[in-house]
Image (cartoon, rainbow, N blue to C red):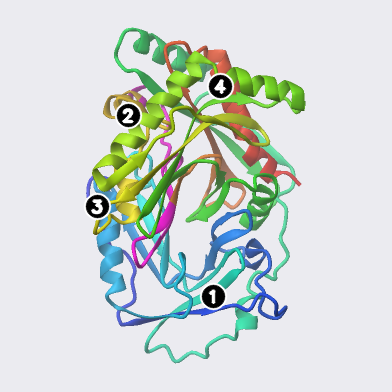
Amino acid sequence: MNANQPTPVAHVPAGRVVARTTPLDLPDAATDPGALLDLLPADSPLSWVRRGDGIVAWGELARIEVGGDGQFAHAEQAWTRLLRTMTVHDDVRAPGTGPVAFGSFSFDPASPAGGTLVVPRVVVGRRGPLAWVTTLAEEDDDAPRPTLAELLRVGAAPVTSPGPVTYTDGSLTPEAWLDVVADAVARIRDGAVDKVVLARDVRARTTRPVDPRHLLARLAERFAGCWTFSVDGLVGATPELLVRSEKGLVISRVLAGTVRRTGDDDADLARAAHLSHSSKDLEEHEYAVSSVAQALTPFCTSTNVPETPFVLHLPNVLHLATDVTGVLAPPGASSLALADALAPTAAVCGTPTAVARDLIREIEHLDRARYAGAVGWLGADGDGEWGIGLRSAELDPEDPHELRLFAGCGIVAASVPDDELAETEAKLEPMRYALGG
């Protein structure tokens, strides 16, 4: 794909499509979906799950590929055209029912990774006591329809672990990355930019082929409060919600400012107290919150931005966090349009955003691909959930033994390179854990 020439449509059915959503009777063991992730096949699983709720999917009915500037808008235009070819029977009518598309988009529109919307053939969802299954098929498809029991047995193949894993340097050695951070700090102090977020990658090679379900299960178990995702080869568990749009209400969870946990409860409480008063981390967090609030304001009749952040406790790190909320102005932008307006936030790019992105292109020496880009799902009504693709790994489509792990951190004038390297190591822990046995 040429990153400068958007290609808004790749593979879609030629005729009409029928989408059917039916409820699942949870008390009935024969139709209870149980753990959503347990349903997934090893081949190209699609997932967006948090604390057991969410949607999982498999099979590919359609694929929309985009690249370059305007990738979100072009993806939405193609999705809208595809919806016009669908006949929808939705007996549940809840967020995530009806036809949905899973998507992931590159952090930088100039990246050859581009963006993709995948429209699956089977979706199973769960939201508290409510559960459902959606199937999509071409109207003239005469193939026998699988039974519900057959649909829910799709993930029955045993999950395999990747075995011993070897890690090697990615685009830069740790020592070279320290020099990049020092360069960024010097430029910030010279006034070139207020904040810039720098990422690094680490390569992993597994003994056995990677089964994405192994990664998803371990991430969901240890990081239940995060959104565990798998879309088009990007797998991870993000703690940062770029935007959720549901019935006219929007929310964005902003994270910026991080310290590593020690494993000792008393020590971690002390670290949390220090984090909440750290001028360096509060400055970094303020830039991120401001960028989100400013991006949402044109779409909302009102927004609410808490005055002070709270400390989000994750198994490996502590984050300063703020939930920015708003009420959409009618007729209401889609979740994908909101994601377009928000991405990239200062939490993953910097301030001012355009200047920070140019600096990243100049000094980072890394194609982030879809790391730190938007990842999530979109429904037929435009509502959906989009996270920032953090705590993630990119599976190599050519070699099932190869992955790239990513981590990044915000750099401000007070940043110390060695401390920032340590922060990236802490943020690599979730994917290292996911690869473990």
The label nearer to you, 1 versus 2, is 1
- In front of the other: 388 or 126: 126
Residue type indicated by callout 1:
Val
User: Is 143 placed left or right of 163 in the picture?
Assistant: left
- How far across and how far down the image is residue 165, in percent? 70, 41
Of label 4 and label 2, which has the lower sequence position? Answer: 4
The label nearer to you, 4 versus 2, is 4
User: Is 233 placed left or right of 429 in the picture?
Assistant: left
**Quarter-wise, where is residue 30 in the image?**
bottom right
The label nearer to you, 1 versus 4, is 4
Residue 323 painted magenta? no
Q: Is residue 109 visible?
A: no
Residue 374 painted magenta? yes
Q: CA distance from mark 4 to mark 2?
A: 28 Å
Task: Please report the residue visible at 41 percent of the width from the left and 71 percent of the height from the top.
Answer: 99
Q: CA distance from mark 1 to mark 2?
A: 41 Å
Q: CA distance from mark 1 to mark 3?
A: 33 Å
Discs 3, 2 touching: Cβ within 8 Å: no
Of label 1 and label 3, which has the lower sequence position? Answer: 3
